Image (cartoon, grey):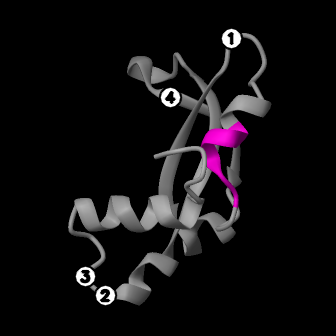
Amino acid sequence: ATPRSTARQLVREALERYGLAPEEGASGEYVLCDVVGRPGGPGGAWQVEHLRPVGDAERPLVLQDVWKPKTGCSRRFEIRRRQEVER
């Protein structure tokens, strides 16, 4: 990933790397999500406080530089099925 990489490019690359999207159009089923939370749930599980789907043309590494989560929270990017996020 570079600062010029778009969310759509990163999703496609990740799916190809793990063999989850054999068809070109399959990457549209997934979306990169900006997830803010903290560890500390049951068994040390990650507790999500905020989840936002990242737009296909947005650049995640730029987002990471310009917006920091509040003290005590961390950010991670997750790939999720678009259908589940839109619910």
Which is in the foreground here, disc 1 or disc 2? 2
Q: How crowded is mark 1: few (under 14 residues within 10 Å), some or many (20 or more)?
A: few
Label 4: which residue? Answer: 46
The answer for how far apart the CA atoms under marks 1 and 3 are is 39 Å
Q: How crowded is mark 4: few (under 14 residues within 10 Å), some or many (20 or more)?
A: some
Pointers 2 and 3 in contact (C-beta within 8 Å): yes
- Mark 1 or mark 2, which has the lower sequence index? 2
Which is in the foreground here, disc 4 or disc 2? 2
Numbered range of the magenta stretch: 58-63
The amino acid on which the numbered mark 3 sits, given as a three-letter code, is Pro
Label 3: which residue? Answer: 22
Q: Determine if the magenta segment contains residue 56.
A: no
Label 1: which residue? Answer: 72
- Mark 4 or mark 2, which has the lower sequence index? 2
Quadrant of the image containing the C terminus: bottom right
Which is in the foreground here, disc 4 or disc 3? 3
Q: Is mark 2 on a helix, strand or loop?
A: loop
Pointers 1 and 3 in contact (C-beta within 8 Å): no
The amino acid on which the numbered mark 1 sits, given as a three-letter code, is Gly
- Mark 1 or mark 3, which has the lower sequence index? 3
The amino acid on which the numbered mark 2 sits, given as a three-letter code, is Glu
Label 2: which residue? Answer: 23
The amino acid on which the numbered mark 4 sits, given as a three-letter code, is Trp
